[in-house]
Amino acid sequence: MPRNTQRPWYHEGLRFECTQCGACCSGDPGYVWVEQNEIDAMADAMNLSVDEFESQFVRRVGAQKSLREYPDGDCILLDPQQRTCLVYQARPIQCRTWPFWDSTIETEKAWRETCQECPGAGKGKLYTFDEIEVQRKQKRV
């Protein structure tokens, strides 16, 4: 059986440079899925015990865990005044791999929508196809 060798639409790469605007951490409600090792690292970054961190910042969704949100949909770890992440150096993989998620690069239309929402998408450093794939495969979102 022949293998599908069609290249993804982004095979020539995509541009992205974080402007640290906080747009990817705010807006519509959603989930930032976190693993225990990520929770441990974030707790350490905030000088909290894991139990304290989980009780304040994590919610259980079925069998998984996600970061909590403010009522307006902003991530609980987004500083409301500075619009920066309280645990940037220890942020979860899901956050580190933005904007190269399955949902944002599945189609050219999805990427155009991402570029409208994120001022750094479509600008700055050119990420190669291989670099994008490494990011995309770390956490499927």
Image (cartoon, grey):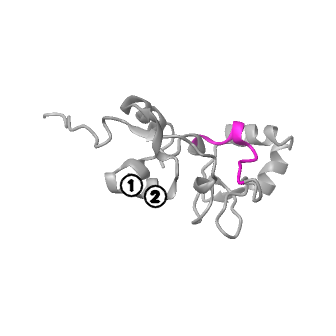
**Extent of the magenta region:** 83-93
Callout 1: few (<14), some (14-19), or many (20+) C-alpha neighbours within 10 Å?
some
Q: Is residue 78 left or right of residue 45?
A: left
Question: Camera-side residue: 133 or 85?
Answer: 85
Considering every residue shown, the one lying at the far left of the view is: 1
Q: Which residue is mark 1?
A: 112
Q: Among all residues in the image, which is located at the extreme bottom?
A: 71
**Helix, strand or loop at disc 2?**
helix
Q: Would residue 109 appear left or right of 137 to someone viewing this image?
A: left
Q: Residue furthest front?
A: 124
The residue drawn where x is 71% and y is 49% is 84
**Is-magenta flag for residue 13?**
no
Which type of secondary structure does the marked residue at label 1 adopt?
Answer: helix
Percent across and percent down for residue 118 are: 52, 53
Give the amino acid at mark 1. Answer: Arg
Camera-side residue of 138 and 96:
96
